[in-house]
Amino acid sequence: MSERALVVIPTYNERGNIERIIAAVLTQDERLEVLVVDDGSPDGTGEIVDGSAGCFGIRCRCWRDCRNSNRFPARRGSRRRLPSPARSSTR
């Protein structure tokens, strides 16, 4: 089995950019996967990622933090459990 890598993209209000960003990452190498960490974006960034699951499939997942504490906590990381590879999204 070939090695795979996970690209973590922290987001906050990136509705207008997120699909283009994900596509740009995934076209670099078929072994890459994307985890979008949406920090409670009120603009629906997480919903856009969920809606894009048909285009990107299992290679793209979204984890949402509903506390809406801007993108910086997402960049620092979280000690909470992240979604399993078999799930496309968690709420």
Image (spheres, helix red, strand yellow):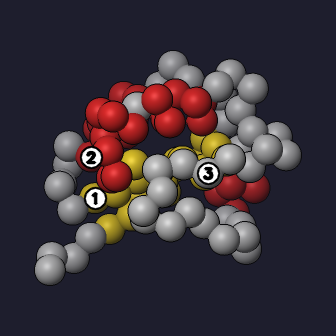
Residue pointed to by mark 3 = 90
Relative to 52, is 3 on the left or the right? left
Closer to us: 27 or 49:
49
Q: Estimate the spatial distance between the alpha carbons at disc 1 and disc 2, rounded to whole Å.
A: 6 Å
Amino acid on which disc 2 is placed: Leu
SS type, badge 3 = loop
Q: Which mark is residue 40?
A: none
> Is label 1 in contact with label 2 (beta carbons under 8 Å)?
yes
36 relative to 81, above or below:
above
Asked which quadrant contains residue 57, the reply is top left
Amino acid on which disc 1 is placed: Leu
Residue pointed to by mark 2 = 26
Q: Estimate the spatial distance between the alpha carbons at disc 3 and disc 1, rounded to whole Å.
A: 20 Å
Asked which quadrant contains residue 68, the reply is top right
Residue lying at 32% horizontally and 68% vertically, measured from the top left: 5
Q: Is residue 13 visible?
A: yes
Amino acid on which disc 3 is placed: Thr
Residue pointed to by mark 1 = 32
SS type, badge 1 = strand
The image position of residue 7, as x and y in percent, is 41, 58
Relative to 76, is 24 on the left or the right? left
Closer to us: 25 or 60:
60
- Nearer the camera: disc 3 or disc 1: 3
Q: Estimate the spatial distance between the alpha carbons at disc 2 and disc 3, rounded to whole Å.
A: 21 Å
> Is label 2 in contact with label 3 (beta carbons under 8 Å)?
no
Closer to us: 89 or 74:
89
